[in-house]
Amino acid sequence: MTLQEVRALAAKGEGLKIEFKKKAAFPEKIVREVIALANTAGGDLLIGVDDDGTVSGQRFIEEEVFVMNKAIDTLIFPKLEVECTIIKLTEKKGVAVFQIPLSPDRPHFLKEKEKKQAYVRVADRSIQASREVWEILKKGRVPKDTVFTYGRKEELLMKALGENGKITLKEYSRLARIPIFLASKTLVRLVTANVLQIHPQESEDYFTLKE
């Protein structure tokens, strides 16, 4: 990758497939961005680029790369292979581009105090994945036909979506008068069957009919 290509990439601004960091000051937080990119659509993490897209570079960029590689190697489960390219701006300053694939081993997660936390990308933000998103990521690794029975609870769901356009897990559980775990299972099954689409949110995910 050339400096011209890096500048063109940075000019696009942060989004679904691109994240900027001035430096690797808190690698344990930055790996969440790496996980989110690997779980969602792949993309690039640029170190040495300001939030506004200015390619200002970072001194001792090799050290930044060493710190990030160590964090990626020790904090992300299952192991994630990423490629990194260093582009020099001056003798002392450079930019690092981490190219992160859409991983076939998703969902990747971070282990914090015995708690597994997966992340996904929503626009230019990385958010923690709900249990439903986690299940959908797992099932999406090996696409296959999903068979489901269309009964009362599915009928109520379709009617509600027809009227309101979207629904949350809790709303569906109340509407169909079924336990949360069963509502969750139904929604996940309908997403994997390409009937519904999930929209991950920081507060509460919502579901819509697949367009």
Image (tube, grey):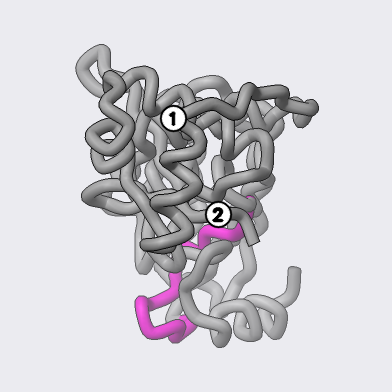
Image position, residue 151 (x, y; %): 54, 26
Badge 2: residue crowd in 10 Å (few <14, some 14–19, many ≥20): some
Badge 1: residue crowd in 10 Å (few <14, some 14–19, many ≥20): some
Q: Residue at x 67, y 43 (%)?
A: 194
Looking at the rendering, in which quadrant would you find the N terminus?
A: bottom right
Mark 2 belongs to which amino acid?
A: Leu
Q: Nearer the viewer, residue 101 or 125?
A: 125
Looking at the rendering, in which quadrant would you find the C terminus?
A: bottom right
Mark 1 belongs to which amino acid?
A: Lys
* Residue indicated by mark 2: 209
**Main secondary structure along the magenta-highlighted residues:** loop
Per the rendering, the mark at residue 103 is none
Q: Quadrant of residue 209?
A: bottom right
Q: Residue at x 42, y 67 (%)?
A: 124
* Residue indicated by mark 1: 153
Q: Name the element at disc 2.
A: strand
- In magenta, the rendered stretch is 42-55
- The mark that comes first in sequence, 2 or 1, is 1
Q: Nearer the viewer, residue 129 or 198?
A: 198
Image position, residue 97 (x, y; %): 59, 60
